[in-house]
Image: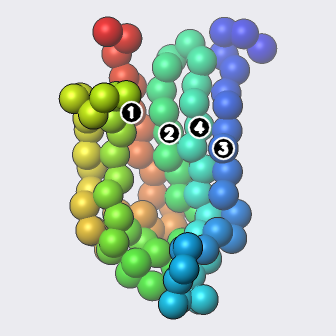
């Protein structure tokens, strides 16, 4: 109910495009929260490879033209492990 609604985008058992790693199973979600304007990325079961847990990824958020950004990880195999989450609270302006 407004003003506390959430929009959730969820990926279940996703895999890598054109992957040579059929064992990778990716489960994660992005939650956009009205009112607080927070963006949460929540990792469920990720793995089993280091690629699946962030070893070949950039994790962060940026504005539309890329001039403002917040990066939390780059090619860090522990950045997207099962149960990890990140929260951003972007300002409006």
Say whether marks 2 and 3 touch (CB < 8 Å): no
Say whether marks 4 and 2 touch (CB < 8 Å): yes
Q: Nearer the viewer, mark 2 or mark 3?
A: 3
Q: Where 30 sits versus 45, above or below? A: above
Colour option used: rainbow
- Residue closest to the far left: 67
Q: Secondary structure at mark 4?
A: strand
Report whether residue 11 is seen: yes
Q: Residues within 10 Å of mark 1 (few under 14, many from 20)?
A: some
Residue 74 image label: none
Answer with left or right where residue 69 lies relative to residue 86: left
Identified at 23% across, 29% down, the residue is 68
CA gap between label 1 and label 2 equals: 6 Å
Say whether marks 1 and 2 touch (CB < 8 Å): yes
Check disc 2 and report the residue beneath it.
Answer: 40
Q: Where 39 sits versus 24, above or below? A: above
- Considering the image in quadrants, where does the C terminus appear? top left
CA gap between label 4 and label 2 equals: 5 Å
Q: Tell me residue 90's x, y (percent).
A: 36, 23
Q: Where 53 sits versus 5, above or below? A: below
Q: Tell me residue 73's x, y (percent).
A: 27, 56
Identified at 49% across, 20% down, the residue is 37
Check disc 1 and report the residue beneath it.
Answer: 88
- Mark 1 or mark 3: whose residue is earlier in sequence: 3
């Amino acid at each position: 109910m407004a003003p506390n609604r959430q929009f959730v985008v969820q990926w279940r058992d996703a895999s890598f495009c054109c992957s040579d790693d059929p064992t990778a199973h990716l489960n994660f979600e992005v939650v956009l929260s009205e009112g607080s304007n927070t963006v949460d990325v929540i990792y469920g079961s990720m793995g089993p490879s280091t690629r699946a847990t962030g070893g070949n990824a950039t994790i962060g958020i940026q504005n539309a033209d890329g001039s403002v950004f917040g990066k939390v990880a780059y090619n860090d195999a522990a950045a997207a492990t099962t149960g990890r989450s990140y929260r951003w609270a972007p300002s409006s302006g």
